């Protein structure tokens, strides 16, 4: 496995090999949910359980964010009553959960993914459409030249 | 007297930027403000006569109208940012137009969005006015000059409701006032009130209608788009949760996040550029990206439109035809060379090193279809040169072309350009074909091109679509060249609106000729034009011209084919048969889940034709059978009838056409050629697995023969 010790190191020094995209799971409608199917390209980069856990946690966060009822009722009524001016001052529950999600992704990146040469991109940056995992060259296993590592990766695929 | 509220609601910035009718929103605002004025004028009387609560209620109502109007106007509807180039590298050309997904047990079709480069999520649609995909797209409202989608439907709906009530209130109270002052009817105050009543009554009718319509939609859980297109007319709507739940969801689904949209802020783009593009072009790429994203940064406040990211469909053509990305071109010899090749083909060699001229030349070329004789030396030299800078070209062009869409387009009209260039391209290809048929010298040159370019592409792309080249390796015969052409051109006709982009992307490591052909292809189609309608028009025009060309070329080829000796075909068969052997990197066995390579439908049909004509047997080469097995669509079904029918024919070792059968939905293939194909092929030919997807576009296509194809296809499937 590669020896990235922090995200900065990885982002600025490693070269991107490929990107793996985890698509949305639309089986339950348009609620934000990502597929927990493990992408084949990451087979030798990360353990299945870890990625699955990450995706499941993200899914649960999104469910929480989009949940209708309780606090969202209050927020809706308050917003209507104040002609939505309250949105200038207050952070909605949805926003709070989104922030929580990006914090979680950051943490996951630092702890789990960066050491393996991977990088999760917050789905919000892709419109919640995909979960993008950038795969950087695995310094530990291949040579230093990007072309050789890329060719090895491509042939391996 | 009441206060004189003169409320001028400044039109939002986006109105100007989007270029839609500014007066509508502002007039509506003035209207409501004038209503308010009059209302306020009458308020004292109303307060006294009817009820003291009237003025405050009216004021609150009006405020509510304004607030919802503001939110509906400025709130991002749920814009999906354009997919990055890395995302669709697998999807672009070979992927089907539609993907089915199961939503709560109901099969929903996700369509590939050619502008945004992803499969549109369910309920998502591409707004042609705003030129982006919107989640849960309802409609584009000209009155608020914004798309209405997932995030702001609530505000739009409440705006409609509140406006209805407001207008009813104004009408009612005005009427009360007038009736009360009937004897003073011709006095000024009454006259004004009468005018107001009539205006509000007049506008009340459509607003009421629209409100009622949306109430109906909400109860059924549909969007306007779905209602209008009749998606769930007969069937179950999997997105509906029941009338009451739908209402509840509507009112409380507050997906508001201030930090939301700006998907792909410029800083993010820059970082990505640094990370991904570690060739020397990156600075330019970044520069382009930044300047273009700045240009594209339309709205300041809440919902900034996501700047069209730098990716591009690798549209070198776009860059060429576009001509606006001068800074990009400067570093790209390839660009120049490709353009020059086009020019060389069309007009005679002009390998000037000024890349800036290339766009102009591109436009010239587009405008003036082929007239110059083909210059083989130019072609081969340019191709060789092309290979050197292919890698640099790829990324930068992708980057630039994307951005170059709206703001960068020169005076060229994309539609005209496209239509003009397609004949040019086809003619160019045919010229090349002639050239190639005349001498086989070009073959080796292409091979040479491939090898040097490969490593570069590997570097750039990371995972070069190796297996994609296979079908384009066969050069040196007009058939092959035609195949390239077909592949290039068919995407335009194909179901996806912008297939060439994918095509371009896919063939990064292939020969320069391919690239050139792609260049020739009117890639401006792939430009994120502001009106998606342009795509349709474009493809119509192109398809019409391409159809003609194909028919011509088919006839020519048939003549040529029949005139050829077997010997000539001998070596070429090997090419067609096992294209990957040519000089490609070894890995052409695709992973099981991936889609098969896209052989040009045209080429394979042509094979079929020529096979039938010349009596060559159809032999399934090992490679083709393996590739057939890896194909996701079912060419196998068609191969058997072909084989059985041709088994009696003597075997010249023609590859099975199904091996080249486009598993892809894109290559629509020459619909016109269907009619010219022998009955054998038209019934058994599996070509149009993709044409079934073309049915969606059929309305815009002038090809009546497609119907047959899709029918036969359905049988095949």
Image (cartoon, grey):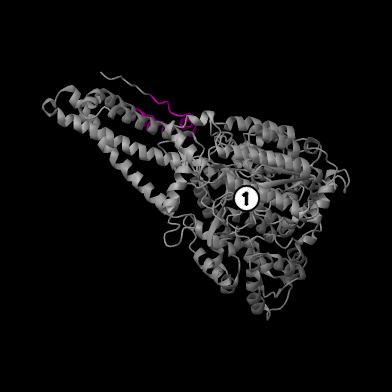
Q: Quadrant of residue B439?
A: bottom right
Residue B199 relative to residue B615: left or right? left
Q: Residue at x 57, y 69 (%)?
A: B677
Q: Residue at x 59, y 64 (%)?
A: B689
Q: Position of residue B486 (x, y in %)?
A: 63, 57
Magenta region: which residues?
B8-31
Whether B231 is drawn above or below B335: the answer is below
Q: Secondary structure at mark 1?
A: helix
Q: Is residue B705 visible?
A: no
Q: Residue at x 49, y 65 (%)?
A: B707
Residue B51 relative to residue B218: left or right? left
Q: Position of residue B499 (x, y in %)?
A: 61, 52
Q: Nearer the viewer, residue B545 or B171?
A: B171
Q: Is residue B516 visible?
A: yes
- Toward the front, the furthest residue is A70
Residue B517 relative to residue B244: left or right? right
Q: Position of residue A61 (x, y in %)?
A: 62, 45
Q: Nearer the viewer, residue B393 or A86?
A: A86
Decide whether the magenta segment is chiefly helix, strand or loop. Answer: helix
Residue B15 relative to residue B42: left or right? right
Classed neighbour count for the residue bearing mark 1: other residues with Cα under 10 Å, few (<14), some (14–19), many (≥20): many
Indicate yes or no whether the magenta region holds residue B369. Answer: no
Q: Quadrant of residue B169?
A: top left
Q: Which residue is mark 1?
A: B500
């Amino acid at each position: 496995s590669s020896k990235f010790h922090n995200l900065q190191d990885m982002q600025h020094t490693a070269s991107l090999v490929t990107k793996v995209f985890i698509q949305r799971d639309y089986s339950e409608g348009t609620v934000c949910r990502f597929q927990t199917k493990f992408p084949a390209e990451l087979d030798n980069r990360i353990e299945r359980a870890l990625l699955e856990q990450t995706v499941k946690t993200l899914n649960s966060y999104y469910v929480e964010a989009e949940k209708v009822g309780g606090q969202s009722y209050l927020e809706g009524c308050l917003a209507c009553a104040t002609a939505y001016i309250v949105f200038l001052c207050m952070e909605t529950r949805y926003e709070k959960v989104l922030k929580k999600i990006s914090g979680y992704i950051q943490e996951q990146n630092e702890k789990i993914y960066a050491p393996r040469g991977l990088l999760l991109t917050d789905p919000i940056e892709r419109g919640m459409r995909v979960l993008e995992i950038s795969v950087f060259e695995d310094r530990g296993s291949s040579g230093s030249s990007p072309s050789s590592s890329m060719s090895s990766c491509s042939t391996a695929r | 007297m009441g206060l004189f509220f003169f409320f001028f609601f400044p039109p939002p910035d986006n109105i100007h930027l989007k270029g839609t009718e500014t007066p509508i929103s502002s007039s509506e605002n003035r209207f409501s403000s004038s209503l308010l004025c009059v209302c306020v004028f009458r308020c004292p009387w109303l307060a006294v006569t009817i009820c003291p609560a009237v003025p405050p209620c009216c004021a609150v109502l009006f405020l509510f109208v304004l607030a919802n109007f503001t939110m509906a106007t400025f709130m991002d509807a749920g814009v999906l940012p354009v997919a990055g180039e890395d995302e669709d590298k697998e999807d672009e050309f070979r992927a089907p137009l539609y993907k089915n997904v199961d939503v709560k047990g109901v099969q929903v079709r996700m369509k590939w969005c050619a502008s945004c480069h992803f499969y549109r999520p369910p309920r998502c649609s591409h707004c042609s006015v705003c030129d982006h995909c919107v989640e849960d797209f309802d409609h584009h409202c000209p009155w608020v000059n914004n798309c209405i989608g997932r995030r702001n439907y609530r505000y739009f709906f409440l705006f409609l409701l509140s406006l209805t009530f407001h207008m009813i209130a104004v009408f009612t109270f005005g009427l009360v006032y007038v009736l009360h002052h009937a004897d003073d009817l011709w006095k000024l105050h009454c006259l004004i009130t009468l005018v107001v009543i009539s205006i509000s009554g007049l506008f009340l009718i459509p607003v009421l209608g629209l409100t009622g319509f949306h109430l109906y939609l909400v109860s059924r859980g549909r969007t306007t788009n779905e209602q209008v297109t009749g998606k769930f007319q007969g069937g179950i709507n999997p997105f509906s949760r029941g009338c009451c739940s739908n209402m509840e969801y509507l009112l409380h689904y507050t997906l508001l996040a201030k930090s939301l949209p700006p998907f792909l802020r410029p800083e993010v783009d820059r970082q990505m550029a640094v990370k991904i593009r570690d060739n020397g072009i990156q600075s330019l790429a970044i520069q382009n990206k930044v300047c273009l994203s700045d240009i594209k940064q339309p709205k300041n406040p809440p919902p900034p439109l996501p700047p069209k990211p730098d990716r591009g469909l690798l549209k070198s053509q776009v860059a060429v035809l576009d001509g606006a990305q001068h800074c990009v071109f400067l570093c790209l010899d390839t660009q120049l060379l490709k353009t020059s090749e086009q020019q060389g083909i069309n007009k005679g060699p002009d390998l000037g090193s000024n890349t800036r001229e290339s766009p102009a030349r591109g436009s010239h070329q587009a405008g003036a279809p082929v007239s110059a004789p083909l210059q083989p030396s130019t072609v081969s030299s340019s191709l060789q040169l092309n290979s050197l800078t292919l890698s640099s070209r790829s990324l930068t062009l992708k980057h630039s072309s994307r951005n170059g869409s709206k703001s960068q387009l020169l005076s060229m009209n994309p539609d005209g350009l496209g239509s003009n260039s397609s004949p040019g391209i086809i003619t160019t290809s045919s010229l090349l074909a002639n050239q190639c048929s005349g001498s086989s010298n070009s073959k080796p040159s292409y091979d040479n091109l491939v090898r040097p370019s490969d490593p570069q592409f590997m570097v750039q792309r990371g995972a070069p679509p190796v297996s994609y080249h296979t079908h384009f390796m066969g050069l040196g015969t007009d058939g092959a060249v035609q195949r390239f052409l077909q592949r290039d051109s068919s995407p335009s006709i194909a179901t996806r609106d912008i297939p060439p982009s994918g095509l371009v992307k896919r063939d990064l490591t292939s020969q320069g000729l391919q690239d050139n052909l792609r260049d020739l292809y009117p890639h401006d189609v792939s430009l994120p034009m502001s009106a998606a309608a342009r795509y349709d028009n474009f493809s119509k025009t192109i398809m019409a011209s391409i159809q003609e060309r194909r028919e011509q070329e088919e006839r020519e080829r048939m003549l040529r084919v029949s005139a050829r000796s077997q010997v000539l075909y001998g070596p070429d068969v090997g090419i067609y048969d096992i294209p990957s052997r040519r000089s490609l990197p070894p890995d052409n066995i695709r992973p099981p889940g991936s889609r098969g390579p896209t052989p040009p439908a045209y080429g394979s049909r042509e094979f079929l034709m020529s096979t039938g004509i010349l009596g060559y047997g159809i032999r399934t080469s090992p490679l083709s059978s393996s590739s057939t097995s890896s194909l996701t669509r079912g060419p196998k079904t068609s191969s058997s009838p072909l084989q059985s029918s041709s088994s009696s024919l003597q075997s010249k070792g023609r590859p099975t056409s199904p091996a080249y059968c486009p598993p892809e939905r894109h290559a629509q293939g020459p619909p016109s050629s269907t009619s010219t194909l022998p009955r054998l092929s038209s019934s058994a030919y599996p070509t149009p697995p993709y044409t079934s997807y073309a049915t969606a576009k059929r309305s815009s296509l002038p090809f009546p023969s497609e119907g047959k194809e899709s029918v036969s296809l359905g049988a095949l499937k």
